[in-house]
Amino acid sequence: MASWVVSFGIIVALFLASANAQLSATYYDKSCPNALSIIKSEIKKVLSNEPRMGASILRLHFHDCFAQGCDGSILLDGSSGEKTAGPNLHSARGFKTIDAIKKNLEAACSGVVSCADILTVAARDSVVQLGGPTWTVPLGRRDSKTSNQNAANANIPSPISTLSNLSSLFQAQGLSTKDMVALSGAHTIGQARCTVIRNRIYNDTDIDSAYAKSLQSNCPSDKSGNRNLSPLEDVSPTVFDNNYYKELTKKKGLLHSDQELFNGGSTDSLVTTYSNDENTFFKDFAAAMVKMGNISPLTGRNGEIRKNCRKAN
């Protein structure tokens, strides 16, 4: 029995390695040579008008990968899909930007570039456009024909997560503690709704009191203003930098889950490192993004190349 288990494990490992090996940075060089420039151009145009959209695209990619792998499933419409899961309902955005990119790519090379790859590259380009690091994106993902609401509800971390919760959810995706802390740095851009932060700014104790009070005028305790927005990091909320970590060391994490990374636990030292060394943060973030982008991709004959990112062919 033991030898069978070992043999089976080797087979599974080889299968997964084979699937990831099919991803290549040069995947579209012949089939759609302008694919990356088309994506970059649209992202640059959109973010020049609305920098916040960069955070939204990055979040879409993260939520896509954590549900059932990086397969574009979050983009599918439908009342029972990931769009209407708790972590995405009324908060996930950027779908029209992906639609615009897909339209341009279909005009250039119909049926070639997957929605999953579009989202992965758009996330990278959004970070770069806002001043963050760049990295080489392995390509060749195919699109899922289905969307998994239950997986989104179960796998995407909550803004009230504890450090233990966070670690477990990231580890389940094959991501290390360092990956988790580095990827959390995405919260150096973007905003959160009042309904998400109300309990933190009125009831949490691990928060700078002056910071909490400054947020309360835009997020009343009487449950009005639920959709009012506050920046996840208010020093430079539209610039991708390491100020997120600097704010955590001052007990100014907007989300409870953010502050859990610097609250006397095992990840304090990494937060301190990133707060003092932006280059190290950028390097680790880029590496973690590549790793996350390789979570369970559909390749080969699996999935499809959607003509419309909102529905299966």
Image (spheres, rainbow, N blue to C red):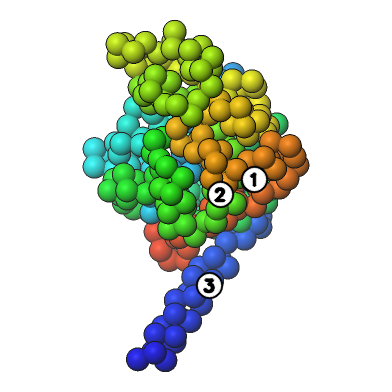
Horizontal side of 196 relative to 299 (left or right) equals left
Percent position of residue 300, x then y = 47, 66
Q: Disc 3 marks which residue?
A: 18
Sequence-first disc among 1 and 3: 3
- Asked whether the residues under the numbered discs 1 and 2 touch, taking CB atoms below 8 Å apart as contact, a structural biologist would say yes
The foreground one among 69 and 227 is: 227
Q: Quadrant of the N terminus?
A: bottom left
Q: Where is 150 relative to 240, above or below?
A: below
Which mark is drawn over residue 269? 1
Foreground mark, 1 or 3, reads 1
Circle 1: element type: helix
Percent position of residue 80, x then y = 24, 42
Q: Disc 2 marks which residue?
A: 266
Sequence-first disc among 2 and 3: 3
Tell me the quarter of the picture where residue 52 sits: top right
Q: Mark 3 belongs to which amino acid?
A: Ser
Percent position of residue 126, x then y = 61, 34
Q: Mark 1 belongs to which amino acid?
A: Ser
Query: At 43% from the left edge and 12% from the top edge, which residue is drawn?
Result: 216
Horizontal side of 68 relative to 17 (left or right) equals left
Query: At 75% from the left edge and 39% from the top edge, which residue is drawn?
Result: 277
The answer, for residue 73, to whether it is visible in the render is no
